[in-house]
Image: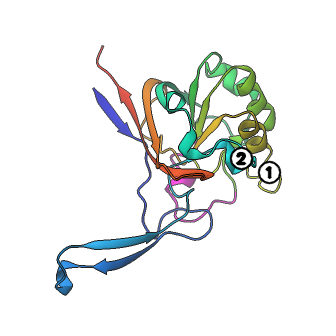
Amino acid sequence: MKIFDITLPIHPEMLHWGRKPEVEVVESLANGDASNVTRWRLGAHTGTHVDAPAHFVDGATPVDQLDLHALVGPALVADLTAVTGDIGVADLEAAGVSGQRRVLLKTSNSAGPLKATERAPSWVGLSPEAAQWLITEGVALIGIDYLTIESHTRTETWDAHHVLLGAGLIILENADLDGVPGGTYELVCLPTKLVGADGSFARAILIERDA
């Protein structure tokens, strides 16, 4: 069994949309305390994280009530590293996404923008038309290797988010797929159980089992 950890490390200098994580030392052995204790200030959408439908739809499913069956199970890593701009329907069809329940989009983001510490001026995102196509194909979870699945040209209207979350899909963002070849794996994605939250940071792994 081979395990790919596709989770970004969380630290104060990391790539983040908005305010970066902050760490406070509450107790330390060096200062004579009984143990080392830290307090972290960070947003629900820090690092590798899950967007629940409640992120864009009032009254929709929050992250603590997501179906674990959608977050754990076979997943396709679709190699879209040759795509520039928005991922379209034809790109998804060519990558074999049709009929898949869980899909992770591996793009040029993994080797480029995802490795930076500041947001890039552009990145590969998902077109609204492709988002709608995923719904018709019965996809339950869609992931991508950047801060957002949204195109860099649509961060005012958030069209793909409205389409996907409005239909109840789960979005996984900031998945580090740089060292993961395209193919089928077992996904284990467990967001922290933040009650009533619009999303949550998660530990996500892909498992490749021996034949």
Q: Residue tagged by mark 2?
A: 150
Residue 50 position within the rendered picture, expressed as x and y whole percent measured from the top left: 56, 45
Q: Quadrant of residue 139?
A: top right
Identify the residue shown where x is 16% and y is 85%.
Answer: 32
* Residue closer to the observer: 127 or 140: 140
Q: Amino acid at mark 1?
A: Arg
Which range of residues does the magenta coloring cover? Answer: 108-121
Instruction: Say if the magenta span includes residue 119.
Output: yes
Question: What residue is shown at x 48% (from left), y 48% (from top)?
Answer: 193
Taken as a whole, is the magenta stretch helix, strand or loop? loop
- Amino acid bearing label 2: Glu
Q: Where residue 19 appears, x then y in whole percent? A: 58, 71
Counting other residues with Cα less than 10 Å from the Cα at mark 1, is it few (<14), some (14-19), or many (20 or more)? Answer: some
* Residue ID at (62%, 28%): 140
Say left or right for 61 vs 13.
Answer: right
Residue 65 appears in the picture as rendered: yes
State how many labels appear: 2
> SS for tag 2?
loop
**Tag shown at residue 47:** none
The answer to whether any part of residue 145 appears in the image is no
| In this picture, residue 145 sits left or right of residue 122 | left
Q: Position of residue 16 (x, y in %)?
A: 56, 62
User: Alpha carbon of mark 2 to alpha carbon of mark 1: how far?
Assistant: 6 Å
Residue 154's label in the rendered image is 1
Do residues under tags 2 and 1 come within 8 Å of each other at their CB atoms?
A: yes
